[in-house]
Image: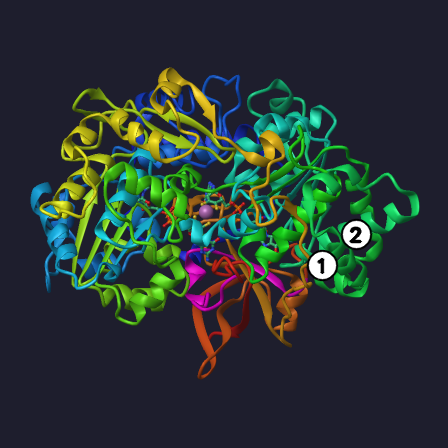
Amino acid sequence: MVTRPPEHDIDESQVTVGAPKTRAVGVPAVLHALKMSVDQMGVARSVQTLTRINQKDGFDCPGCAWPEEDRRHLAEFCENGAKAVAEEATVRRVDPSFFAEHSLDDLRAHDDWWLGQQGRLTHPMILDEGATHYRPISWDDALDAISDALRALDDPDEAVFYTSGRTSNEAAFLYQLLVRGFGTNNLPDCSNMCHESSGSALGQTLGIGKGTVSIDDIHDAELLIVAGQNPGTNHPRMLGALEKAKQRGATIVAVNPLPEAGLMHFDNPQTPRGVILGGTTLADDFVQIRLGGDQALFQAIGKHLIEQHRVHGGIIDGDFVEAHTSGYDEYVAAMDAVAWSDLEEATGLTEKRMRAIAERVRASGKTIVCWAMGLTQHKHSVATLRDVVNVLLLQGNLGRPGAGVCPVRGHSNVQGDRTMGIYEKPPEAFLTALDDEFGFHSPREHGYDTVEAIRAMRDGRVRVFLGMGGNFVSATPDTAVVEKGMAQTDLTVHVSTKLNRSHVVTGTRAIILPTLGRTDRDRRGTGEQRVTVEDSMGAVHGSRGRLAPPSDDLLSEVAILARLCARVFEGRGDAPRADWTGLENDYARIRGHISRVVPGFERYDERIQKGRTFFLPNGPRDARRFATETGRAMFTANALEFPVIPEGRILLQTLRSHDQYNTTIYGKDDRYRGISDGRRVVLIHPDDIRAQGCVDGEIVDIVSEWPGRDGMEERRAEAFRLVSYDTPRRNAAAYYPETNVLVPLDSTADVSGTPTSKGVIVRLEKRP
Ligand SMILES: Nc1nc2c(c(=O)[nH]1)N[C@H]1C(S)=C(S)[C@@H](COP(=O)(O)OP(=O)(O)OC[C@H]3O[C@@H](n4cnc5c(=O)[nH]c(N)nc54)[C@H](O)[C@@H]3O)O[C@H]1N2
Ligand SMILES: Nc1nc2c(c(=O)[nH]1)N[C@H]1C(S)=C(S)[C@@H](COP(=O)(O)OP(=O)(O)OC[C@H]3O[C@@H](n4cnc5c(=O)[nH]c(N)nc54)[C@H](O)[C@@H]3O)O[C@H]1N2
Ligand SMILES: [Mo]
């Protein structure tokens, strides 16, 4: 039976704390996901939908970007994929009567869970200047209003165009064309807060900002290091690949401050082994590292390998280093110089322990390092990832089977969006090809990334904000600053599937454009359209929804963008030229344009027909080709950095619970960590609770401290419950987005500019 949306917000006084789990998935996961599916969409629709996820010619799961296995199980089961689908395929609706009933103030008072649980948006809505409620508006009027606002700007740089990572390749390509044709590169995206550090480090050292492994490589690896990642919750299908590698004899080392259930033990619901025989123990070695200690760990591994090679020989792949790399001597000198005592302090591990981990690397003939946000969201993340690359280069673990780098991407098409040109710093070759194809001149000046866009809003330099998916207000750091910045704009526009905070923290005027999701059938012009996406490993494939859309009033992202292009470019001789209506009616024609602009997409449409997949060229993987400054893979010498926590303070990481998708809160539990019915908790070492003069279960405020221009700035998140947890001393964890109020806007990673969401210095304060 479908259940009604919640009437009330989460009641945090109901939170309960039990023992964390030590194993992931299994039958409880199946039951939990089925319940959520049936709550949102009933039995028949649940079956119809769940059996189509990631099947050939079905739709691409809007959950994560982990690739599909070649031989798919019928309804390859993934608890959190099923939840992502249920959220989108829900039969609950947010229609004009909902907006008539709820004023903006009323909506603003609700939490993110309540907002998201109300259902799918069904109709374009506008908030007029000074209005208390959104009112319905026709598509034509809404698109005219947006186009008029853009065309009235003094300078195209007064507009900001954000993208989340669910947008299809076709829509992303049109979007960046709209933005560049309009005259700016202000294209911040969720990547700026996510894997930007990976892109920066890999681009510099390997010449490609992406991973270099395929799913077969994962199966073939001898050693898999999984660092700064919680796959049991965020990439559950990865557990199946790890299990397969394990069964073929791989060793798995998990590096994490928290003993995450999914890293420890996996009960695969697809196999009898997982259901009745007790599943598979995944991590052979759980390395409980301090927050931000990973650069030190990889330096320790490199240092040990270099030392041992000197004594015994045969460890470093001299041929590879000689033929394919640069910077080796400088790197060796830096590793010789780094002190074990510093490496111990940074990691919280002993020299002996680190040498033992390094011995596993030495013993492995094929090593892959996988990582996610635990490695990318620190001040020194880019340096950390360069040191990951250094270790792999030593043994030639790049460009051969079973070895390489595996940044595990977040949103299901975040990688594809970047390939399609959603980037504030586009390379010249891309712009030249784009200009040639559409007969115009793209702006060359770099645009704002996410943090720069917020600064510009704060300083009153942004007048129009457009969000292609996502939830900018909740997802970004320093919530109070973002909310103020948004309010200073003239117009905020969101192309969205579901209601979220960014719809209720608005500019002077605001427009909501409801759109189709992955699961929805997309019928236009020449018939049912498919879109395409790129997974975390550079494989491109089609996605086609089958469900009746939530209302007849929805336009696809492609249709919205094609119509905006027509309006914004009308009568402008210097604008891109294309048959906008033709593109809207036949997405294959967009793929035609892409095939001529983006390398690797030749014969694009043909290669994705009938559920086919193709791999994009990958220099390091395909041919040990490294398009770097030196034309070789680059060793780099990086100074050791790690967070220094002032006296009496704690380092806080902000992460995801098991029942959320970024700012979309599916439910109130974090089953694997033992938390139920609430989210305002701080997971913290029991000795730190005592050291702060508190007791377990006490409710405290979290106050972050940041040395700003005018002295120490304080930011406060109120009323969090202290939960004793197995985490290193002075390292705590709490859920995002609630804790984004604490992340200072200027606290960003060097080079990549990513907010330091995994390293926020805080103190705890007793409540009056
Ligand atoms: N169900 C679900 N799936 C998702 C998402 C979701 O919200 N829900 N989000 C998607 C997106 S956009 C992304 S980017 C990914 C995110 O996937 P993850 O990166 O797994 O997400 P987080 O919850 O941020 O978890 C960070 C992990 O890194 C660890 N960690 C934190 N700091 C450090 C550190 O300094 N060193 C080490 N070694 N470990 C550290 C944390 O303890 C935690 O296990 O998941 C994607 N998939
Ligand atoms: N403190 C802290 N902050 C973080 C992070 C962290 O770990 N800690 N993680 C960061 C990371 S890794 C990321 S990726 C960002 C995520 O930032 P975003 O991508 O901006 O946030 P989401 O919550 O994924 O966006 C959800 C909204 O997207 C819309 N949506 C969903 N599907 C579709 C679709 O198919 N089309 C369209 N047009 N809209 C759709 C829905 O309206 C939904 O409300 O957050 C970042 N912020
Ligand atoms: Mo992400």
According to the image, label 2 marks what residue? Answer: 354
Image point 13% across, 47% down: which residue?
A: 573
* Dot label at residue 347: 1
Task: State the extent of the magenta-drawn residues as a range.
Answer: 729-749
Contact check, label 2 and label 1, Cβ < 8 Å: yes
* Dot label at residue 431: none
Report whether residue 497 is seen: no
In front here: 36 or 450?
Answer: 450
What amino acid does circle 2 point to?
Met
In percent of width and height, residue 246 lies at 70, 28
Image quadrant assignment for residue 53: top left
Image quadrant assignment for residue 509: bottom left
What amino acid does circle 1 point to?
Thr
**360 versus 751 height, above or below:** above
Taking the view exactly as shown, the residue that stands out farthest to the bottom is 710
In front here: 488 or 532?
Answer: 532
